[in-house]
């Protein structure tokens, strides 16, 4: 007997994801406005120092990391939690207070860290409230990575600069005599037969160490290094800064 023709059955359409509640739409619009306001603070700070001129690449890299992780985020089950509001509400209030203080006293380094930190905590709190921990944890690194775009805090700058100057000066004072150049070290000054060579703050590598550490952290994250390889890469990065600046001082001394 002839078989009846088989009528193909169209697959059921995939249901569209539910639209976010209007309250979250408004909250994300406020986050976008806060990002614009924060940009008006960070751009002049980046322009004020030569070593910060390339820091706009840091938030750009964070945006790229979020875009790269978005397919995995979409596949992760959303489980909103009200615990996110415990971060969102205080951080948003502190951001508003920091903006008021910035308007009163100007973009001091402490206030730049205050505004950036409270903004990032607000964004993380909003992601927790909107999507839950499963998705939010994938955004934790891109958000924290933005902190490399900030200048080194004032309390850390002198000891960091001093340590780099010390290691660079000590290394140069050890290498130059091996090249036949009599060297007497006095602090951060190398007394050579034909003149003195000072290791200034700009020669210590402090201007490049933060950017290089940021690159190392990004590479370790992308390559999914373990804690041992992660630490080894950071130590090697600092070592590269010290060695490269020591070589520069030695070559200058020889010349």
Image (cartoon, helix red, strand yellow):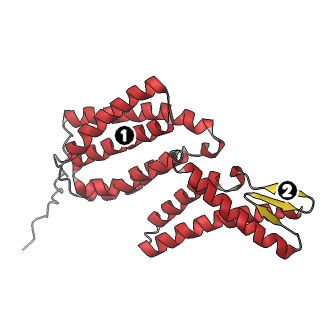
Question: Looking at the picture, how far across and down is residue 223, in whole percent?
Answer: 47, 68
117 left or right of 208 in image: left
For the residue pair 193 and 1, the one nearer the viewer reads as 193
- Mark drawn on residue 196: 2
- Crowd around label 1: few <14 · some 14–19 · many ≥20 (10 Å): many
Q: Residue furthest left?
A: 1
Between label 2 and label 1, give the one nearer the viewer.
2
SS state under label 2 = strand
Q: Disc 2 or 1, which lies upstream in sequence?
A: 1
For the residue pair 199 and 249, the one nearer the viewer reads as 199
CB under 8 Å between discs 2 and 1? no
Instruction: Quadrant for the N terminus, please.
Output: bottom left
Identity of the residue drawn at 63% across and 40% down: 49
Instruction: Write down the quadrant of residue 65 in the picture.
Output: bottom left
Instruction: Write down the quadrant of residue 29 in the picture.
Output: top left
Q: Residue furthest right?
A: 194
- Crowd around label 2: few <14 · some 14–19 · many ≥20 (10 Å): some
SS state under label 1 = helix
Q: Residue furthest front?
A: 186
Q: Which residue is mark 1?
A: 119
Identity of the residue drawn at 29% across and 33% down: 93
Instruction: Quadrant for the C terminus, please.
Output: bottom right
Identity of the residue drawn at 50% across and 38% down: 109
**138 relative to 181, above or below:** above
Q: Tell me, yes or no, if residue 216 can be seen here.
A: yes
232 left or right of 168 in image: left
Question: Looking at the picture, how far across and down is residue 250, in whole percent?
Answer: 80, 65
Marks 2 and 1, how far apart at CA: 48 Å
Q: Tell me, yes or no, if residue 211 can be seen here.
A: no
Identity of the residue drawn at 58% across and 70% down: 236
């Amino acid at each position: 007997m002839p078989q009846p023709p088989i009528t193909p059955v169209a697959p059921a359409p995939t249901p569209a994801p539910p639209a976010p509640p209007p309250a979250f739409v408004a909250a994300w619009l406020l986050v976008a406005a806060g990002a614009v306001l924060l940009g008006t603070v960070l751009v002049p700070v980046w322009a004020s120092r030569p070593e910060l001129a390339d820091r706009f690449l840091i938030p750009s890299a964070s945006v790229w990391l979020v875009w790269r992780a978005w397919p995995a985020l979409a596949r992760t089950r959303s489980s909103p939690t009200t615990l996110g509001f415990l971060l969102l509400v205080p951080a948003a209030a502190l951001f508003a207070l920091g903006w008021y203080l910035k308007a009163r006293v100007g973009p001091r380094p402490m206030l730049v860290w205050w505004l950036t930190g409270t903004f990032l905590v607000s964004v993380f709190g909003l992601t927790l409230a909107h999507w839950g921990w499963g998705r939010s944890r994938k955004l934790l690194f891109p958000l924290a990575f933005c902190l490399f775009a900030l200048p080194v805090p004032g309390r850390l700058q002198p000891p960091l600069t001093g340590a780099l100057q010390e290691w660079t000066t000590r290394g140069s004072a050890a290498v130059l005599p091996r090249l036949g150049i009599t060297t007497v070290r006095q602090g951060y000054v190398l007394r050579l037969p034909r003149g003195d060579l000072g290791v200034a703050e700009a020669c210590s590598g402090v201007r490049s160490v933060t950017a290089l550490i940021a690159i190392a952290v990004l590479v370790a994250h992308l390559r999914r290094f373990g804690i041992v390889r992660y630490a080894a890469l950071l130590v090697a990065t600092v070592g590269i800064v010290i060695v490269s600046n020591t070589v520069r001082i030695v070559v200058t001394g020889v010349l």
